[in-house]
Image: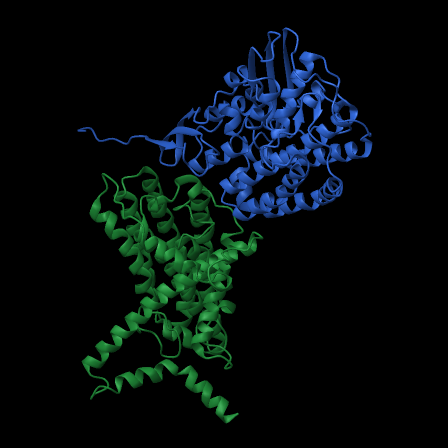
Chain colours: A green, B blue
Amino acid sequence: METINNLMVTLNNLFLIITAFIRSFFADPHSLWADLTMNVINFIIVVVIVVLAALILILLERKVAGWTSQRPGPNRLGPRGWFQTIADAIKLLGKEDVTPEGADKFMFKVAPMIIFSLPMLSLAVIPYGYQLAPINLDLGIIYYLAITSISTVAFLMAGWGSNNKYALIGGMREVAQMISYEIPLLFSVLGVVMITQSFNLGVIVEAQKSLPFIILQPLGFVIFIIAGMAEVNRAPFDLVEADQEVVAGPFVEYTGLRWGLFFLGEYGNMTAMSALAATVFLGGWQGPAFFPGWIWFWMKAGIIIFFMMWVRWTFPRIRIDHLMHFAWKVLLPLSILNIFLTGLGIYIYRLVMGG
Amino acid sequence: MDIEKTQELPLNLGPQHPSMHGLFRMVVNLEGEKITKIEPKMGYLHRGMEKLAESRTYSQFIPYTDRLDYLASPHNNWAYVQTVEKLMGVEIPERAEYLRVIFGELARIASHQVCIASTALDLAGWTAWSYLFRDRERICDMYEMTAGSRLTVNIMRIGGICAEPPAEFWPALQSFLDDTPEMLEEYYGMFFGNEIAQGRLKSVGILSKELAENLSITGPVLRASGVDYDVRKAEPYSIYDRFDFKVPVLTGCDSYDRTIIRMDEIVESVKIIKQAVRDIPEGPIMAKVPKVIKPPVGEVYHRVENPKGELGFYIVSDGTTKPSRVRIRPATFINLQMLPIVALGWKIQDVVAIFATLDAVLGEVDK
């Protein structure tokens, strides 16, 4: 029993131990050079997370799609088709890089880079385990939401820079959709912020030791998931890249690796959104001690990712005016109601407990 | 370029576009997402069917009719061979008539399944699409057992039908018929029961009864606008007067009813096939027709109820082995007239949905 406990503690703190080991190479483990080295390593790890997540999720998405629509999905390359994404990536690398005539070349080339870099920026503030946030930021949630809203600009750049009407329509849709859904998204996490009195994601996870906030904030969680799916352009809110209407939206003129960057960015954004949902509402790395914290974290994020895929392959696409109505007439009032109810709850709690 | 003002955006939807079934093109003017003008452009799949018929013998033209409405090829065969038979005055055996009805109604089910599936697909319901295509496979298998091919079946002959269905056909047919209620329930649950799908289809693209009649719309599109008209009832051809079936009529006039009426028609088709399987007599499947078909001088028009609407063939014979003129009245070509009128003022997404509910097959539109 003692040894198992020790093992669990070691596993739980595995990455902290590795950090201490690396820092021990320096004469002063907390010197500027040691911090810089650690920052570089953290950055590389976040990049690896984004790329790995995209590689795994693309295959998972296709497997889930196959499973919901009663077909096998990719099953040729490697054991049960697990190498399919790698082959696809190699194919994308070999494609000709086309810049359409009349395109705004600078915007056209910069847009995919911005989109790909955003999930890395937003994943940097997520606590993956006990004291395992790459950057421990006091304004974590605000920073996260600010970063995700930059993608609006990048999509519009891609749409405008492509010199294509479909791309432009897709880009304009993106702007309308993102602006509408950012507000309920922010408002839905405000309830949690009111309870914990902090924007720091680490503090929010610590506060969920006894029970996750999904129980205290069920309405907030539902609003967050819906608005989050709209924010990362997942079906049924994928009007931006709706292939039946605008072919591929802003991506329509992109080929090869540029297109691949959009794809990586999309799946990275999805990972980031699920990671935030798991952190804020499902208790992050907190969980019963039979798994290390970082495994709990990825399990919770994985459940939300699976839920998003399940919804995508079940629902048809919503219409643009219904989308707007839903944001402004349903989600926004509900999220304000959630804030009001949370405030009322805190007031009553303090009255009763005398705090 | 010195005057800056808000302009409408002309946009080409098609001919290469994911939601244009086949090679259809429409030029739309957009005001934001709203459509202010639609100009359908056809002819990208024009193969000159009518002219081709003039240089082929009567029997040689049957495979070409498969390529008209390729989702319901037995119906096209049927319409054509019946026209020729009417011209020649051939009586065809009972068993062949029953088999023709069975395959015709199977084709109707398959065609409606494709229509519902592609409507679902145009609304991004990928899963619903794959379920419907999975069930359609079983009909394709039945075609294959009998005629050897799965899409362009070429199953009818002048004077009868190409082959006797093999022994394994009948159990396959029976199990398909038994499973249809379950299938329809599944389609409804997968797609039509969905709140988003209903929001996309209900009260969208209203085709009023008067407009439908004035544009001579036929088929399910007409019946979804509240007009009770079906060639099988109005002018029974083949042996349709022997069967007990209803013509479903809905009064919603919108995209939703245009799609859901096809589910009701599948139910009626199943009823007809069940009666046909019950009553089918033994006997020959080909009438005695001469090897070289030489109809007498004259002209004839014959129409049938294709899954998409009224399909008519007009043949002029000059007494030789080749028709002097063949004219096809395609159902969806005429149904497509409503698109620029009905879809005005709706969003891009609605136009895609309205176009899908028309069930246009470009092989038939462009001939």
Depicted B27 relative to depicted A16: above or below? above
| Residue B144 percent coordinates (x, y) | 64, 38
The image shows residue B245, relative to residue A281, as above or below, that is: above
Residue A100 vs residue B203, the one in the foreground: A100
Residue found 39% across the figure and 46% down from its top: A241
The C terminus of chain A, quarter of image: bottom left
Would you say B26 lies left or right of B133 here? left
Q: Which residue is drawn at 46% across and 87% down?
A: A7
> Vertical placement of A310 versus B185: above or below?
below
Expressed as whole percent of the image width and height from the top left, the position of residue A344 reads: 47, 66
Residue A45 visible to an observer of this rendering: yes
Picture coordinates of residue B64, whole percent (x, y):
56, 25
Left or right, A262 with reference to A195: left
Instruction: State which quadrant residue A301 falls in.
Output: bottom left
Q: Which residue is drawn at 49% across and 45% down?
A: B124
Q: Is residue B222 visible?
A: no
